[in-house]
Image: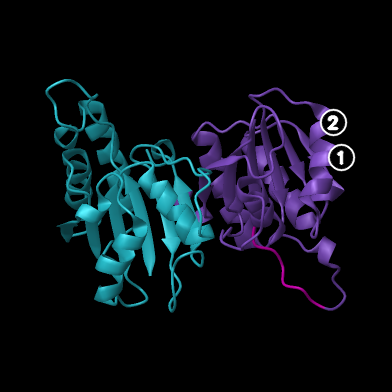
Chain colours: A purple, B cyan
Amino acid sequence: MELYLIRHGIAEEKQPGLKDEQRNLTKEGRQKTEKVAHRLEKLGLQFDLILTSPLVRARQTAEILIAAGVSSQLEESTHLAPDGQISSWLLNWLEPRNYSPNTQLALVGHEPCLSSWAEILLWGEVKASLVLKKAGMIGIKLPEIGSAVGRSQMFWMTPPKYLL
Amino acid sequence: MELYLIRHGIAEEKQPGLKDEQRNLTKEGRQKTEKVAHRLEKLGLQFDLILTSPLVRARQTAEILIAAGVSSQLEESTHLAPDGQISSWLLNWLEPRNYSPNTQLALVGHEPCLSSWAEILLWGEVKASLVLKKAGMIGIKLPEIGSAVGRSQMFWMTPPKYLL
């Protein structure tokens, strides 16, 4: 199956009185994310499901992707919140579902989680060697059988500026 | 500095009497590579130098990039021929030149060399976890000081279909 790791768009700065999980996309963040989403749709991307972190900035990013027509299915998962562990997500979310080999699944979440998850899937360890910009994405092919950890392959990684 | 690893376009099949180094891009390979080159130019890519493998299919790919205006400088290097070693290229070609930190250098070459070189720059070892299609590219940022091996970062990797 193919896994698309998508980082949320540009969000409000942290400030006193504003909970981190409540930070909205800024106007610029929303516009750039909309452009990216429309370009993905034009390129033919179609996700069977978008799974999003429950934080507002991720949820809003996922809703923009849905509105652009790249998927019609949206779910939240606390495994995708900041500090989420891929081992926990694999064990408790992905593996019990037994998806078909041609499933296209998009995850909307946060850094440094997403690029670390990508490294764990590709190499089995984290070296901070992937730069994932806000509203950028990584495309990874998981093996059909056996553990995905250290056995997956990357076929795409892009900052938003090359999708505008 | 930024390093762009670009794989040559689709070339003629191997056949008796045709030397591997003489294989030309096919008509389709030429057309797709031209589209990719024009898209790179439109995205604002500008390389200070394109360094190409001396094999015909790589040289033709590099010439298409030059014709599209993404660089005006082209050199051949035998280090980029199939089976080239990154250690040899770094030691004998890159390091003696002492490029400035904002140099943008493109290498046109072959698989599995290019994706292996990328993995060595990012992780220090090869696990065959990057899928680089013909006329696809990888963008890597090298550290300003010290060895690039295992200390570089990837910011872009794309198959040609997302550049057409």
Does residue A38 lie above or below B23 as drawn?
A: below
Q: Chain of mark 1?
A: A
Does residue B18 lie above or below B94 as drawn?
A: above
Residue A133 lies within the magenta run: no
Q: Can you see residue B106?
A: yes
**Which residue lies under the disc numbered 1?**
A92
| Position in image of residue A89 (x %, y %) | 81, 44
Label total for image: 2
Mark 1 element type: helix
| Position in image of residue B32 (x %, y %) | 29, 34
In the image, B153 versus B66, the foreground residue is: B153
Quarter of the picture containing the N terminus of chain A is: top right
In the image, A139 versus B77, the foreground residue is: B77
Mark 2 element type: helix
Q: Chain of mark 2?
A: A
Classify residue A65 as left or right of residue B102: right
Residue A41 occupies which quadrant of the picture? top right
Labelled pair 1, 2 in contact (Cβ < 8 Å): yes
Look at 69% across and 51% down and name the residue there: A117
Look at 19% across and 52% down and name the residue there: B66
Classify residue A128 as left or right of residue B10: right
Which amino acid does the dot numbered 1 rest on? Answer: Asn
Q: Can you see residue A7?
A: no
Q: Which residues are magenta?
A: A8-15
Q: Which mark is residue A96?
A: 2
Look at 69% across and 60% down and name the residue there: A111
Residue A13 lies within the magenta run: yes
Q: From mark 1 to mark 2, how far is it between C-alphas?
A: 7 Å
